[in-house]
Structure formats: structure tokens, C-alpha cells
Image (cartoon, coloured by chain):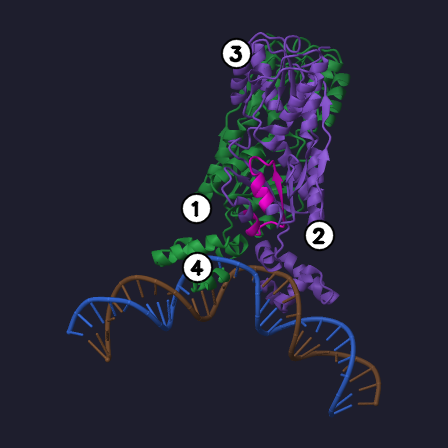
Chain colours: A purple, B green, C blue, D brown
Amino acid sequence: MSDIARLCGVSTSTVSRALAGSPLIQEATREMIIEIADANGYVINPLARGLRLQRTNTIGVVFPLGAITAQLISDPFFQQMLGHMVDEISLRGYQILISKVAPPKPGWLRELIKAHRTDGMVVIGQSDQHAALNDAGQVYRPLVVWGAHLPDQQYCVVGLDNEAGGRLATEHLISIGRRRIAFLGDASPPEIHQRHQGYLAACRAAGLEVNARLDMPAAFSPQQAEAAAERLLAASPDVDAIFAASDVIALSALQVLRRAGRRVPEDVAVVGFDDAEVASHSNPPLTTVRQDLAHGAKLMVDQLFRRLDGESTDGVTLPPQLVIRQSTVAR
Amino acid sequence: MSDIARLCGVSTSTVSRALAGSPLIQEATREMIIEIADANGYVINPLARGLRLQRTNTIGVVFPLGAITAQLISDPFFQQMLGHMVDEISLRGYQILISKVAPPKPGWLRELIKAHRTDGMVVIGQSDQHAALNDAGQVYRPLVVWGAHLPDQQYCVVGLDNEAGGRLATEHLISIGRRRIAFLGDASPPEIHQRHQGYLAACRAAGLEVNARLDMPAAFSPQQAEAAAERLLAASPDVDAIFAASDVIALSALQVLRRAGRRVPEDVAVVGFDDAEVASHSNPPLTTVRQDLAHGAKLMVDQLFRRLDGESTDGVTLPPQLVIRQSTVAR
DNA sequence: TACCCTCTTGCAAACGATTGTAAAAGCGTC
DNA sequence: GACGCTTTTACAATCGTTTGCAAGAGGGTA
């Protein structure tokens, strides 16, 4: 900037004000300065600017990956969410700084905040970090989290009503006459825990027995999910329906069932969760609980920017929607 | 930092050196300083640090979206690439700054570089920005681009041999007896152009006629791709094979063919490109040209870091691999 | 000419780190 | 005690901006 100032025969403060469009600078001077700056390919240094202004025009998108998930790529959910976030945030002229926190160490979120590299943060998924989020949420306002609504939470959450989703899926399976309904998924992240609660509630309401043999922990990666599905079939050969905690898990279950010679949906009906792109193209197409990630991402970013403006926001609970396809109801 | 210095009864320079692990600082002093810094939740400010060091520990991932693509989310290719990039870069302890450049204005890349927010950059896809890349690549070293290898290029490219991929796909269709093979895709981005060249070469080698009715521009979004597939069927009802420029386009074609009552592969065989997750789960599963994005991403990041170390790298051309599934060969 | 007023511009102090160089401290030796 | 040597610490400049405040320029009026 001092080079430009020298070229223009003015001081850096004048250049700075001219580029910022300050009314203190005469129109003719401004035009001259802008022209010379452009001609010399001058670009303002965002680091220095951020340091001075304490504003970076950047939003952080954080993926806390606890014990549950090893890699980001493992699930299309993360990929899609990230894609939507990039779209929504760049629409508002902000930059995006991604942090993958794996595994989270104590204080990770406070450190991320205190680094002051971003004006606000979006956290995708609570993982097992509810305490850290509560801790930060009380003092740091521009924070929005995607995940489950928890009773004692001190931070702004946008997320699906996962319990209702679990109930919806399970009631659908019950309504088509299934009685031995298995749950396939690891219920330790809060979102999945709530889906599981919904499953249990629906089973109890219908007077169905739920036992440990029907309740099979399964991680999100296809390989581990297949292994879990095989364990399930071995433990409960008479299972007549599977409610999987995600579409990826459901697709793995479909593969295992096909290899085992079970027909879907005649012998075993399968329901997934997410309505990822794959769900509609699978064979058979997958009945699933749809979460509208594009809308969710939009809401999160909306709320975040309202918080940046000093408003306070309460989060949103989105209604789940059951999408019925041929994995539960044959044509 | 000056607070910590005051608390410790030393100067900021001592604190800085202690935290950086400089041998100039006595062990006892260092331990005392680190302890006090931790106890007070002190976190170094990366903006100030970056400003001083002219290093940000950040890699930029840039998506230039030219006239071709409207949204980032439209194609799983971008989502997957982004996911892999995040994985590979964070593995090396660097942060990731995403820029979606849509549409690219003249000088966008030089501006991005001159902003000095990142130590290096990865550009995903050339779009229609070959000139801008050439312009920047000559002066800016830490730049790696995913895309097609072009004759006069001055920048480091990692990418698939798209022409070979196009040839492979087309030869496969020819080998199963197809004669009226359509190309579905917009050949203006270099990658797709090369796939199209491979298609033309294979057709010519087999003595097949290629006419405009078999050559149908199709954008990457499912809606537009479906419309294109419908136009194709209308223009050339006797088509017996479709080579689609991406899996998303191929899946749209499958939908349209099903609605039109054509059997796949008996009436019309379909080949896609990418081997996205959806390809293996579709109905019927899609024959496609696989690009190993995980490997590609790893190579790109490898080369970028070697360039950061002052080495110069030449880019890599990856071999395509045909994955044959039931959309071309019935079981 | 002296004075005041308005309009522009420049000076210099931040923002929060790093680092070359100078100074201080500690210690052994003559 | 003076000197020199090594070890440890502090001073101050620097990275590239922004901005409160002071000062200069120009013009009108008494």
C-alpha cells in the first residue's frame, strides 16, 4: 500500500480511505488512486486488515470427529453438508475456513475461538463433544451447531427431530406388518441416540419386543456396517426388517442381504436415514427418512449471520419426512 | 501475549521464543511460561503470526465455476474431491481455506494469490480458465491444478487421461456390438473435451459414423441432463448406446430411458464417468470409467507440498480404469 | 492583512506476533 | 576488583492495514 501511496504522491492513510470509500476523500483523488492501484495489481492484505479490524470476513466450518468416525470422506452426509455450507457462506461474500478436529482434545473449541481467525463458527455434528459446545456456547455468541436438541444445551442448534424420524421409520415398518425389527447403528452420537429412542418408543407402543439381538451397533463406514449387518443376520436369522441409522449403513445391509439370499422387501424390509443421493438410485430404491440438508444449511447460516448482527437466535427443529420406496413396499 | 509476559515477569520476546521452543530460552523459564500461558488459556493469534512470518499454515482450495456449472453442490465429483482435500491437507497439519469463484472475473487468480492468505493453492478443475491458470502458473510456484493436460500449459496438473478414458468407454460399447453410440455432455471444459475426443477417435477407428444427432450437449445438473437425454431420444430414437460425460448425467439418462420404456442394457447400453458412489448402487449398476479421486487428491497435495519445499514437480497423468457393470453387460 | 471556517490530507499509534542485535547477568581467572 | 567469556533476557523494528486527531490549504469576510 505504501508503494501505491508513493506512486500517487499521497500518504497511505489516503490510499486506505480511498479504497474503503471513505467520504473524507475527494472524488478526483479517489479515482486517481483506484486507477493506479488497479494498474499495479494492488490487492489488499486480508491478514493485516483482519489484524487491525478484528474482523476476517471468514466463517469457520468445523467437523469434530470423535471416537465415532475416523475419516471425513466416509459418509456422504458430511460431504453434502460441506458442499451446502460452502454455497451458502460464499453467497454472502464470506470465506470459508475448514477445520477437521480429529480427535478433539480438551479445549479444542475454545482454542479455535480464541485464535480469532473467523468471525463466526458452524459446527457440523455434536459427536461426543456436547460438553465442549456448552462450555463455549455460553460465552461465544456467533456459533451455530448442527445436531440434536439436548435438554441442558447452552448453544444454538439447528437439526432434525431425530426421535420423530426414528419413530416414523419404525411405525412404517410396523404398519407393513413387520414384527422383528432390528436397529443397525451406533447410538452414541446424540443424533443417532435420538433416532434409536424413536425406534424404541414405536416398538413399545406397538407391543413389540426389543432385545439385544436386534440392536446392533454399526459404525458409519461401509465395511464396518457390512460386518455389523452380518453379525445381525447371524444373531437373529428371523429378522424381518432393518432400520439403519444412515443410508450408507442401509446400503451395506442391502448388499449383505442380497449375498445371504434374502429378498428385499419380501423377506426383510429396509429403511435408511438421510435420503442421500444414493438412496433413490439403489437397488431396490431405499425407503428413508429425509433430512433436507440444503434447507438446514441455509437456516444455520441465516441464524449465524443474525447472531453476527447481535441478534440472538433459538435454533430450529426441522420435521423429518418419510420417503417410501421399494425397499419396504414392492411395486 | 503481553499479558502473559507481564504475568511471568518477562518480556514478550521471551514468551514468543519460549512458546516457539527456541533454544535461547532456559528450560526452567520455558516451563514456567508455558504453564502460565496454558493456565490462562492463551492462544497465539495466527493473523498476527502470519503477517509477521509471511506464512499462514493454510492451503487454499479453489473451485473456479465458469459458465458451465451454476452450483457447487450439483455434482458429487466436487463434493468428493473437497472431502478428500480436507482429509489430505488436515493430515499435514494445515488449515483449509475454500474459495468458490463463480463466475471468475479477470484477474481472480492473481488476486487470490496476492492476498497472501494461503501458502499454496489447489485449483479443482480448469473450467474455462486455462488462460488465467497459465498466467499465474508462470510466476506462482505453489500451485497444483486438477484437470486435463493441455499442450501449452505452464502449470502443474494432476489428472486423469481423459482421452484414454473416453476411448476405453467407447471401445467397450463397440465391443458389445453397439453401433449408434451417443455422447451426452458439454464438451467445453477441457476434461470433457478430451473425453469427447476419445469417443470420436474410437468411433472413427471402428468406422462408425458420428453425427450431430448423436452428440448432445448436457450440463451437469440432473434436471438439465434429463432434458438433454430426452432431446437425444427424440432426435435419435434408434440410439443403442450412450456414453455420458459423468455419472450424474448417466443416471439421469437411466431415468429417462426407463420412463421411455427402453431396457438397459438390452435396448440401450449406458456408460458413465467418475465411478461415484452412486454408480455401484444404481439400478442397473452403472458401467463407468473410474477415476480414483482419493489417490488423485493425495498426489495433488504431495506435489503441492514438494513445491512448498522448493522442488519443482511435473504433474501426473493417471490411467483410467473401466468398471464394467450391468448397464452394459447383463448378467 | 488577520481571522475564521470548511475541506483535505498526513502523522502516528494501534492490531499481535517474531527476531536481529544490544545489553545485562553470572561466573571463572588473573 | 577488573576483565573476558558465555548464557540469558530485553529493546525495538517489522509485517500491512485502519483511524483519531492535528495540521495544512484555500477561500471568504471584516
**Mark 1 nearby-residue class (10 Å; few <14, some 14–19, many ≥20):** few
Asked if labels 1 and 4 touch by Cβ distance under 8 angstroms, the answer is: no
Instruction: Give the residue number, with chain letter if any, for mark 2.
Output: A310
Q: Chain of mark 1?
A: B
Viewer-side label of 3, 2? 3
Q: Secondary structure at mark 3?
A: helix
For residue A293, above or below residue A10? above
| Residue A202 locus on image (x, y percent) | 68, 21
Residue B162 sits in quarter: top right
Distance from disc 4 to disc 1, alpha carbons, whole Å, reads: 31 Å
Q: Secondary structure at mark 4?
A: helix
* Kind of residue at badge 1: Gly
Residues at marks 3 and 1, common chain? Answer: no
Viewer-side label of 4, 1? 4
Viewer-side label of 2, 1? 2
Q: Chain of mark 3?
A: A
Instruction: Give the residue number, with chain letter if any, for mark 3.
Output: A234
For residue A231, above or below residue A26? above
Asked if labels 1 and 3 touch by Cβ distance under 8 angstroms, the answer is: no
Verify whether residue B102 appears in magenta.
no
* Kind of residue at badge 4: Val
Distance from disc 3 to disc 2, alpha carbons, whole Å, reads: 56 Å
Distance from disc 2 to disc 4, alpha carbons, whole Å, reads: 35 Å
Distance from disc 3 to disc 1, alpha carbons, whole Å, reads: 56 Å
Precedes in sequence: disc 3 or disc 2: 3
Instruction: Give the residue number, with chain letter if any, for mark 4.
Output: B15
The answer to whether residue B106 shows anywhere in this view is yes
**Mark 2 nearby-residue class (10 Å; few <14, some 14–19, many ≥20):** few
Q: Chain of mark 2?
A: A
Q: Secondary structure at mark 1?
A: loop
